[in-house]
Amino acid sequence: MTIVIALSALGGLTLILAGMLVIANKKLYVYEDPRIDVVEDMLPHANCGACGYPGCRPFAEALVGEKALPGKCTVSTDSGRQKIAEFLGVALGAEEKRVARLACAGGTNVAINRAHYQGLKSCQAASLVSGGGKGCFWGCLGHGDCEVVCDFDAIVMNEFSLPVVDVDKCTACGDCVEACPKDLFSLQPISHHLWVACKNLEHGDEVLEDCQVGCTACGKCALDAGGDLITMVNNLPVVNYRENHSTKDPIQRCPTGAIVWLDEKLGIIKGKESKKIIRKGERGVGHS
Amino acid sequence: MAWFNFRNNSFKHGIHPPERKRSTNGLAIRQFPFSPVIILPMVQHIGAPSEIMVREGQEVMRGQLLAKAGGYVSVPLHAPVSGTVRKIASVPSISGKMVPGIYLEAFPSASQEVLDGTPIDLTSASSDEILQGIQDAGIVGLGGAAFPTHVKLKVPEGKHCDVLMINGIECEPYLTTDHRVMLEQGEDILMGIKYLLKSTGAAEAIIGIEANKQDAADHLEQLIPEGSNVRVQVVPVKYPQGSEKMLITAILGREVPSGGLPIDVNVVAVNVATTAEIGRLLPHGRGIQERVVTITGPGIEKKGNYRIPIGTPLRFVLEQVGADERISEVYMGGPMMGVAVSNLDISIVKGTSGILVFTKDEVSRPEKVYPCIKCGACVDACPLSLNPSKLGILAKFKAYDLMADEYNLMDCFECGSCSYVCPSHIPLVQQFRSSKAIVRKRIAGKQTMEHAD
């Protein structure tokens, strides 16, 4: 008899609770477009944020809600984006590829350090100890926070402790932009070939003391560019990319090679008159 | 919150590093010579930079106003020496940043004579006039934080101050500036306390002094007239008691809330050297031109306490006191919270309390950092009862938001106790410092985003 009571009590309870679940399932049901799951699976699952959304799922929701176009995803392959566009029946929305560019060329072979930094091997930590010990306050510290933070292995530190961006791998997710304590990275459309690789706000010999490839603010590039293409602001040339910037003229007379031409095939091209850098070793610790 | 007091006038946790004060605490304060060129950054305090009011080539008199305050949380700057403004350009600062500044060339025969201003009369001046006088004198916290003192003294509406805490703890090893100031400028301190009591409206003033400076405590007690509302309180030696929050807990048993200020527990705390400067400058309406700095460490020949003009380049200071050729590290401030200097062309600023010089032999850095073994030594050391071990692990995984939201990262004032005791040599404070910088950057980013919306 006892077993019957026990079974019926538990069985009854099961039925009541199951009934509540059934009702809740019907009453509280939220309709979700099933295409969101499908689109999310088509995306690369990198959750990098390059599209401007917090991750792949919110981007998929935006795609299905037609608030964004598949072209925004810079990580997918062309065919991947095409597939999503066909699936949703929307335009591809081609975006120009952007890449992270470093506004510093002061590797260990050209830039001096004032002091040796010892401690946590991170640019962020080093920058908080008297600026990190590099002669140029604005320059790259070379401890590789950007290399660590890059999810796509697009940044590699070269032999001069300077990060090199692999244009093919870079998805313009912006992690390196956030990681750099000196704010040297920025995302630039790949068609921007004219590039100022220096952020030093000083001018003249004071720059050269610290770094041989720094901008001395001589202003030759601004003069040669003509028009409003380049203006000198705070001792640095600023390129106005709204103007026609497909000319190599401005870089030719740069004495230090601070303004360069980023060629897709040939890499960094410096002007004809810029000083050649042949030193391979470290420039070391200078004027304490 | 009386149970935090344990009846022995101290605070929970903390550490006992070797004091190393013996080599300088018996040496009287000496005047430092003028350097031929004085370099004055406009950012010597927390807040807006000062605004330069002189032109290149202008001749200025010692004590003349060079720059005015750039806002409410800012202070003016006075000429530390009579001379000519050689150049107005960017100058290096202790943070490593280039900041706007003035290169001042001293007259070869510049005298110690100072230009007087409008005196602030103690009996007739109102509370606000005293605060204005303190701002006009360019006074900032001389203990090291360099926060403008008049902002700190301003009691917000709806709050009141009942105790004025004068901080003469000086818990950092090596430093002896406050000790010497208390021994030699007792009258100035008491004068300063009168100004501060009047401006804050506090009923009593307590001078907190650590037991290793008993002579200073005795000296001040002698000077205090009977029946005065000023008293000296000696507390046991412990680091970081010089932090105002720790000092208030130690003496009054009140705990300043997380993210709060001493005024939240009705206290205003002021450093003893700052108090002495207020008492010395306000009766003459002068501005601050020099400060007492302890120069010590194994790499220094003529160790001592010097009254150094603000803006004296570090290189000149080291030449004068005879630095060892084998110097490897120079610190501004104490060994626990001071900053390693990366450039000898920076100058003495208002917040510089000490210069420490070490040679290669003294500074030994652990070769290897071992993993956290969760021994809890840092938890026992943290004066704020944070969990440095957990925070360190989270920092490794870059969980900065979690550190700030759940583990009170932003309360950490970087005293270095956790790194000091860590048997695995984990650079905990350095991790927290960079984590805090990242959190601050994110908060600022969010705010600009909201503004954009």
Image (cartoon, coloured by chain):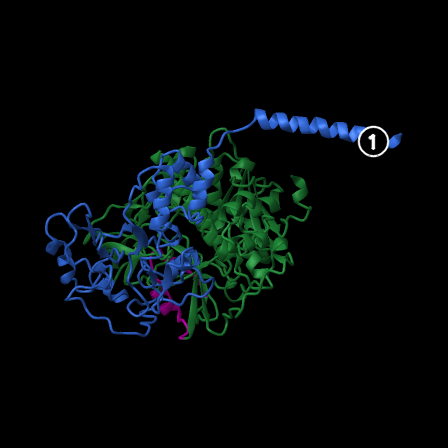
Visual hue assigned to chain A = blue
Q: Nearer the viewer, residue B120 or A110?
A: A110
Badge 1: few (under 14), some or many (20 or more) residues near its Cα, within 10 Å? few
In the image, the segment drawn in magenta is B304-325
Decide whether residue B308 is among the magenta residues.
Answer: yes
Residue sitting nearer the eye, A10 or B53:
A10
For residue B229, side relative to residue A44 (left or right):
right
Residue A133 is at least partly visible in this image: no
Residue in the picture at 56% in, 37% down? B265
Vertical position of residue B160 compared to residue A54: above or below? above
Q: Give above or below for B2 relative to A145.
A: above
Rendered shade, chain B: green
Place of residue A54 in the rendered image (x, y in percent of width and height, measured from the top left): 43, 42
The C terminus of chain B, quarter of image: top left
Q: Which amino acid does label 1 sit on?
A: Ala
Q: Name the residue under label 1.
A: A6
Residue A64 placement (x, y as % from top left): 40, 35
Label 1: element kind: helix
Give the x, y percent position of residue B95. 38, 55
Q: Quadrant of residue A88?
A: top left
Considering every residue shown, the one lying at the far right of the view is A1
